[in-house]
Image (tube, helix red, strand yellow):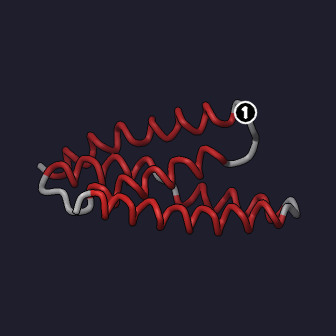
Amino acid sequence: MRAIYVALGAGLGGPARFLIDSYLRRFSNRPYGTFAVNVLGSFLIGLTFQSNGHWHDLLALGFAGAFTTWSTFMLDIYLAWKLKDYKEAIVNLFVSLILGLLAAWLGLNLIK
């Protein structure tokens, strides 16, 4: 039964990531969509980390798991580096990690 909740969440999280990224790419070719979904997903995982039962499976494992994207994050950094946009690569790496950690912390602490 848990797999059904994970699949349902993933079925919503993946398209949500696509829509947010597609929308933000209309304004800039920078990876703001990947940044936004990873920070929002970190917050959601923190917020739902201690949820019981199906909510955790649906939101943290399913939705946030499909919504966030480590692989695209790494690709964006690699491509910026390859294009010799070192500042973009380094800023993306560190700002994403710092804000992602802060978002997860905020989510965890909002439910206490």
Q: Residue furthest right?
A: 84
Q: Is residue 64 left or right of residue 20?
A: left
Query: Quick one: quadrant of the C terminus?
Result: bottom left
Q: Is residue 44 left or right of residue 23?
A: left
Residue drawn at (59%, 62%) of the image:
96
Occupied quadrant, residue 43: bottom left
Residue 94 location (% of width, % of height): 64, 69
Residue drawn at (45%, 35%) of the image:
15
Q: Is residue 104 left or right of residue 81?
A: left
Occupied quadrant, residue 111: bottom left
Judging depth in this view, the residue of 43 and 111 nearest the camera is 111
In the picture of the structure, the residue carrying the numbered disc 1 is: 27
Residue 82 location (% of width, % of height): 83, 63
Above or below residue 107? Residue 16 is above
Residue drawn at (76%, 41%) of the image:
29
Q: Is residue 24 left or right of residue 79?
A: left
Residue 33 location (% of width, % of height): 60, 44
**Mark 1 falls on what kind of element?**
loop
Q: Amino acid at mark 1?
A: Phe
Residue 50 location (% of width, % of height): 20, 62
Above or below residue 28? Residue 52 is below
Above or below residue 29? Residue 19 is above
Judging depth in this view, the residue of 27 and 5 nearest the camera is 27
